Structures are given as C-alpha cells and as structure tokens.
C-alpha cells in the first residue's frame, strides 16, 4: 500500500564519541498474501539540525533566565518578544506590550532629538548604547543602561532589533547624591 511504517529519529554514537542523529523512514514493499516482500528504508543525517535546535533551546533558556532586560522588536519597533526580567522591571506583562512599541515606556525625560539619534544609529546598522530613563507601568521612573543591536537577515537587511539593558536606578541615585554632597562641600570650601 506504500504506507510508511517507520518515521523516527535515531541517535547513535559515531566513532570518536560524536552523536549522530539519523531520520529513518521505511516503506513496506508490496508482497503476496503472506505480507510485505520487504521494505525500503531511507536514512537522512539530521545531526546538524538537531545540534542547532539544541543550541537554540539553550539560548532561549538563557535569555528567559537572565537578570537583564531583553526584548526584540521588528524593524519598525513593534515588540515581538520580552523576557521575564522585562516584565519584572517594567511591571508590564508580556501580553500587554506585544504588538506595541517601546514608546509605552517613554518617560518624557528625553527630547525628540534623542530618539532621532537612536533611530539614525540603529538604522545605520550600528549598536546604540546609552543610559535611558524609562517609565514603569506604575508611573515610577527607572534608569536603564541599554544597548540596542540591529539584527540582519540572510539578505543583509536589518530585520530586528535586540535590546538588552540593566536597571541601574540605584546606582544613578547614589551618583546623584554623591555629586550633590561634593557640590555642597565645594561651596563650603569656597566661602
């Protein structure tokens, strides 16, 4: 009848200890009343695909578990992915931001020129690095040491942007407090 009787992956240890993954498909050959006359089996080496899939799963697990804020947008800036740290820091659940732009985080602390410079940089294929003041869902401001990296597709065109960042709000507050103390000290010494 030509129906497949076997279609599965076999993982075997090759000489040298390297794992080989083979996709095996077998089809019975028509026979008489006693059943099939035999079978034709085709083996395809899928080792590289299996290794690539494993690497992608490991990378995805790392991004999900990192303490850094990570999100991915398409070329026009629409959120396609946010990791759990993004949700924790911003207060926005994944479903609340997917399909929207990072403008949802705008604090009002940066002028239009700041955002024009950001877009000019990333659309030129260069990473953008800056401390950005954003606004959480609660309205509270936070400072983020941010890097936005353009990601090119197989044709060399920018297809996505990956943003990584670290909440440095406490560090910025400490630096501001130290600066104010130094200014007061300088003023006292001058009088």
Image (cartoon, rainbow, N blue to C red):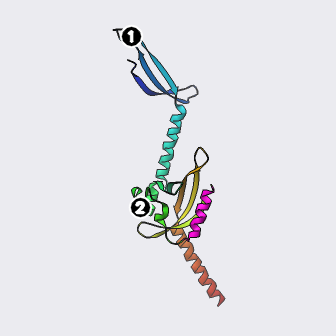
Name the quadrant containing residue 31.
Answer: top left
Q: Position of residue 154 (x, y in %)?
A: 59, 43
User: Which of the 4 quarters of the picture holds residue 6?
Assistant: top left
Residue 3 placement (x, y as % from top left)? 39, 21
Classify mark 2: helix, strand or loop.
loop
Q: CA distance from mark 2 to mark 1?
A: 63 Å
Between 155 and 189, the residue placed more toward the observer is 155
The label shown at residue 79 is none
Q: Quadrant of residue 137?
A: bottom left
- Looking at the picture, does residue 52 appear above or below residue 94? above
Query: Please, is residue 125 above or below residue 6 in the view?
Result: below
In the rendered image, is residue 68 in sight?
A: no
Look at the magenta stretch and give its main secondary structure. helix
Q: Residue at x 50, y 39 (%)?
A: 54
Mark 2 touching mark 1, by CB under 8 A? no
Can residue 172 be seen from the camera position used here?
A: yes
* Image height of 171 relative to 184, above or below: above
Mark closer to the chain start, 2 or 1: 1
Q: Is residue 168 magenta?
A: no
Magenta residues? 110-124
Residue at mark 2: 92
**Horizontal arrangement in the rendering, residue 175 relative to residue 35 (left or right):** right
Relative depth, front residue between 8 and 161: 161
Decide: is 185 above or below 149.
below
Q: Quadrant of the C terminus?
A: bottom right
Which numbered dot is residue 31?
Answer: 1
Question: How crowded is the residue under tag 1: few (<14 C-alpha within 10 Å), some, or many (20+)?
Answer: few
Left or right of residue 98: residue 132? right
């Amino acid at each position: 009848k030509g129906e497949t009787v076997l279609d599965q992956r076999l993982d075997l240890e090759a000489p040298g200890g390297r794992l080989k993954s083979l996709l095996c498909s077998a089809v019975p050959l028509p026979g008489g009343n006693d059943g099939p006359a035999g079978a034709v089996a085709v083996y395809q080496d899928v080792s590289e695909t299996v290794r690539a899939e494993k690497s992608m799963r490991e990378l995805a697990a790392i991004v999900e578990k990192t303490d850094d804020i990570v999100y991915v947008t398409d070329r026009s800036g629409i959120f396609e992915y946010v990791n759990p740290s993004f949700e924790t820091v911003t207060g926005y659940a994944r479903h609340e931001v997917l399909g929207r732009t990072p403008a949802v985080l705008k604090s009002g602390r940066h002028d239009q020129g700041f955002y024009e410079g950001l877009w000019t940089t990333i659309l030129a294929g260069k990473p953008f690095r800056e401390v950005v003041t954003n606004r959480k869902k609660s309205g509270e401001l936070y400072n983020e040491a941010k890097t936005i990296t353009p990601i090119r597709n197989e044709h060399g065109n920018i297809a996505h942007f990956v943003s990584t960042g670290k909440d440095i709000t406490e560090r910025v507050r400490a630096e501001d407090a130290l600066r104010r103390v130094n200014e007061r000290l300088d003023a006292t010494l001058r009088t």
